[in-house]
Amino acid sequence: MSTVVEEIAEALQKCNKCGLCLAGCPVYKATGVEWTSARGRIALLRSALLDHRLELDALDDPIFNCLTCNGCTEHCPPAVPTGEIIFKAREEMLKRQGDSWLGRLVFHKLLASPSQLHQASKLLRLAEVTGLRPLARKTGLTRLFGDAGKAEAIVPKIPPSQGLEAVKRLAGKINNPKYKVAYFTGCHAPNLAPKVAAATVRILHRHQAEVTVPDFVCCGLPAAGYGDGPSARSLARRNIEIAASLSVDAIVTACASCSSFLKDYAKLLENDPEWSERARDFAAKVKDLSEILTDIGLVTEMGTIKKKVTYHDPCHLAHHQKIKEPPRTILRSIPGVEFIELPEADVCCGAAGSYAFKNYDISMQVLKRKMGNVEKTGADILVSCCPACVMQLACGVRQEKLPVRVTEMVELLDEAYRKAKEG
Amino acid sequence: MKKTVSQEREAFHQQLGAVVGPENVLTEAQATASYQVDGFTPDGVVFATSTEQVSQVIRLANEFRIPIIPWGSGSKQEVGPCLSQSGTILCLKRMNQLIELDAGNFTAHVAAGMVNAELQKQLGEHRFFFPLDPVCMETSTLGGEIATNATGPLRLKYGAVRDLVLGVTVVTPTGDIIHTGGKTMKNVAGFDLCKMYIGSWGTLGIITEAVIRLFPLPEVSKSLLITASQENAFRLVGQLLESALELSAIELLDWTAGRYLGDHGAHLAEGKVLLLVNIDGDSAAVARREEAIKALAKTNQASEVVTLQGEEAAEVWNAYRRVHQALLDAVPSTAQGKASVPIGKAADMFRAIKEAGQRHHAEIGIRVYCGSGLLYPYVALEDDKLIFVIASLKQAASALGGFFIVEAAPLWARKKEGSLPQRSDATLMKRLKTAFDPNNILNPGRMFGGLY
């Protein structure tokens, strides 16, 4: 028996088939088919890995069309960690089938180097400006993402950016810092959403935090989600190494997926005697931006934003880190904001990283339900704290033609602070 | 030439595809293996979207002599007697519409695959609710709840499924569509078949639609959490039930089960139990009743009384519903049974359960539906000593004028103990099943006594 199977055997046996998880599974709610629910997926993995009544190879769909949103675990009395089990099952499958050249390119090369990633994102922008995006698709780059052709609508316009270097320039020294933090930008902000990166730095400065921007590599979540555990662990070790040379109070990120996975390093490397302790120390320093702001005391001197605002919980924040209140507290403290609670706010939007690219139809069904709820609130602004969610929600708003602005929490908060200065 | 079994199945699935559309018939391993019941893997899963389709599926099943296992959300698939053979799963999950809400008549016409919690949400938007709240209501479908005669705390005030369901549309085991009962409160001509289908566990027909009674949402609903010793609590229960305080629910959790009620039961000492009482109605009446309950609790030496309202009250009932599953999951191979005794004998049965646990060194958590005399013991035992505990509980319940059955338990225990004791009406019931289902198509084995 391989170690991956050993690792999940106990967790698989914890499922009692009660089906309470069905209430928390957005995919099952969209399809009504048992094998798309946590209970169904667990039953299949038990059949394949423990009872040997099925081949693991036959379970490609059940293993890969899970959002890993952890909505199921929230409803599960023994808290069976289906998301974790799915990641491990993907790793086992990849091990048996062998990795593709594309997987190796993305996880071993691009995501392991901020500069190479920036080059790639510039290529993507070039492709867009020159109308070459369809060609880029044909080159096979998008083969990694099954339904990508259909999913083009989700991809936002790519703004010009100068990558991590630009964020570093913004960071710089400040007078009388109260805190010292390292900003873990994640892959998305510096390359695809430079405004978010800039807003994050400004907000941290506002709270008298001196910001350094080290050359962190990708957090590793996309690799783990793809089933490439070794790459995820290697990226994790690299980040831990980089952090070791820093003298900071916290490692801060404004990306829910990053903060969630960085905190998971402790678990990711728990069986590695050389790294387990360092991973625990690293994980203990990680803070989501909303978390650290409410912890150290939010600066409430802000300008007025007279809008109805609602909030979508990213799964990686609400389910994986149990952070629900801090973003709401922040939004409520902006003068003029009328905060309206979104029905089913903590149900996944269907983005789940690159999920929407691979399982477009299911993802859109999940999104449709979310948009129905957004419409019910009558909000002017829909806020979230995760780049994938924001991309997906913006796509939903465009498709449903809702008069709603979709934005990252940091951007709205930054706007409120800047208005205070202007006023 | 005679067709092989697999050729027969393939032909069956093909014809099913012609009825419901080929995309609604799943036969690949990943689909069928995820619908395993009692160790059987079905040969296919078919999704119907109308009563007419269900009827055609059943007719085909009779033609091919292939058993059909109805499926809503699968919440009660592995409860009670085991299936005796495998077949094709017929899933009603996609028949999930609220067909009509007749506000003036306080009724709703609902398709069987609608999930209870979703129904409540939609009714709530019109200030109505349906007072059926079984522990699995977040996921169970209305059809499944009717077919298994599910019960919940609100039964005390609002009645059981038999009081709440006015009519059902059923596809019989031979594929006929019948409507029995209706929208009116009294509507029986001849035998009351509607009521017969309640609790028939999918063995006499497949319920595809139902007309249910609605109630206006009460102005105020309050929950009281009372901590008291076992003896004092049962005395208090007796006094509350005979009072004019019109409780809508009264549930009891022992010190083992109470631990799973979050903060409220975390520090429950041995010998102490938690009572969950619910009252609803107009605010003045609820306030008056709340005081009266508190006074009674005090005279019975309750050590703590907490009143919850609104979201907090809803949360505690949510937590209460999860206690069932938490107890099952706490220790592997836990078995859960149900003792039904006369209401006044609940305290005696409670003691008998605890004694059986001590005798066999098993930890037994207990939930009690006080208003119905139903006790649910959760026996955490991993070996065949379980059989001795079950035997003691059967004997104790019977001595008190009731009975005990095993509901959720490991497969081996259900195979051994999952049937009801022989009853005087068993032969008649067997004939009833044969008359309705001559080819034994629907849920073979699921009825008590291993009937078919």
Image (cartoon, grey):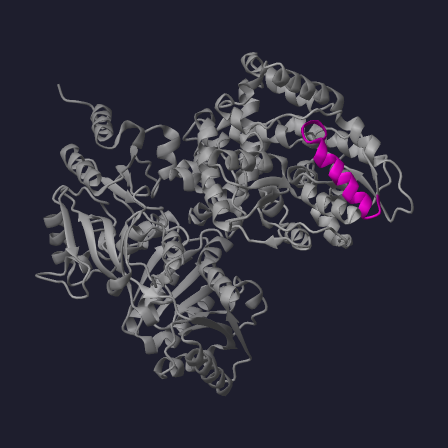
Q: Is residue B209 visible?
A: yes
Q: Position of residue B339 (x, y in %)?
A: 34, 66
- The relative height of residue B164 versus residue A22 in the rendered view (above or below) is below
Q: Main secondary structure of the magenta part?
A: helix
Check residue A196 for magenta coloring. yes
Residue farthest along the front direction in this orientation: A423
Q: Position of residue A130 (x, y in %)?
A: 62, 14
Q: Position of residue B298 (x, y in %)?
A: 51, 85
Q: Going by the image, does B373 lie left or right of A229?
A: left
Residue range (magenta): A190-209
Residue farthest along the left direction in this orientation: B190
Quadrant housing residue B220 = bottom left
- The relative height of residue B445 versus residue A222 in the rendered view (above or below) is below
Quadrant housing residue A216 = top right
- The relative height of residue B217 versus residue B446 in the rendered view (above or below) is below
Q: Going by the image, does A49 lie left or right of B444?
A: right
- The relative height of residue A71 versus residue B45 in the rendered view (above or below) is below
A17 or B164, which is in the foreground?
Answer: B164
Q: Is residue A5 visible?
A: no
A63 or B94, which is in the foreground?
Answer: B94
Q: Position of residue A303 (x, y in %)?
A: 73, 50
Q: Going by the image, does A61 lie left or right of A275?
A: left
Q: Going by the image, does B220 lie left or right of A188?
A: left
